[in-house]
Image: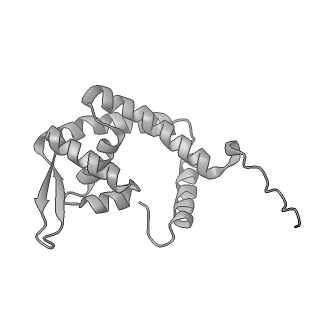
């Protein structure tokens, strides 16, 4: 039996999917520390709140699709936010099997407190790049998003 050639070693420090994942986690964790410490929210709960604020009446399934979160993470985040009084389910008028999620007044209040913190952290991060680099980063991210998900826009 002929010996199979060994594949090239995988160097995580240069492997784009690994690097993007670690960078995304580091950025998310930095911001998460702010809203966890101040408001007791997990990363997943904040993502659900942010998407729901952006798209009131969205379903849990749609949140999973927009955020690339798995069903269990979405379900737990939704349940926790409902328990905290920040989110509520409303029956869909279009489909009896579906419920629509909306922020409660308390949830909207928390969201409005977190947004300036998140935007400030984003501004701090992007300040490491020139304006030209920021434009180029946005362009490159768009190209990678299209390559990763040619069937639908990621954002």
Name the residue located 38 percent from the left edge and 53 percent from the top edge. Answer: 69
Q: Position of residue 2 (x, y in %)?
A: 89, 66
Q: Dividing the image into 4 quarters, which one contains the N terminus?
A: bottom right
Q: Position of residue 62 (x, y in %)?
A: 30, 62
Q: Is residue 69 left or right of residue 144?
A: left
Residue at the farthest top position: 37
Choose between 14 and 133: the one closer to the eye. 14
Vertical position of residue 130 compared to residue 61: above or below: above
Name the residue located 22 percent from the left edge and 42 percent from the top edge. Answer: 80
Q: Is residue 108 visible?
A: no
Q: Is residue 104 left or right of residue 2?
A: left
Name the residue located 87 percent from the left edge and 62 percent from the top edge. Answer: 3
Choose between 79 and 140: the one closer to the eye. 79
Name the residue located 21 percent from the left edge and 37 percent from the top edge. Answer: 110
Q: Is residue 140 visible?
A: yes
Q: Position of residue 139 (x, y in %)?
A: 55, 58
């Amino acid at each position: 039996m002929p010996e199979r050639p060994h594949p090239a070693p995988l160097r995580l420090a240069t492997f784009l999917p690994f690097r993007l994942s670690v960078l995304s986690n580091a950025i998310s964790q930095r911001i998460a520390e702010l809203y966890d410490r101040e408001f007791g929210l997990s990363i997943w709960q904040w993502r659900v709140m942010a998407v729901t604020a952006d798209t009131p009446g969205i379903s849990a399934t749609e949140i999973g699709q927009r955020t690339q979160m798995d069903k269990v993470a979405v379900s737990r985040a939704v349940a926790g936010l409902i328990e905290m009084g920040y989110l509520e389910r409303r029956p869909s008028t279009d489909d009896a099997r579906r419920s629509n999620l909306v922020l409660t007044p308390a949830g909207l209040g928390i969201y409005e407190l977190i947004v300036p913190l998140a935007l400030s952290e984003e501004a701090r991060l992007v300040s490491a790049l020139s304006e030209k680099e920021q434009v180029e980063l946005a362009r490159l991210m768009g190209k990678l998003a299209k390559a990763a998900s040619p069937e639908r826009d990621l954002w």
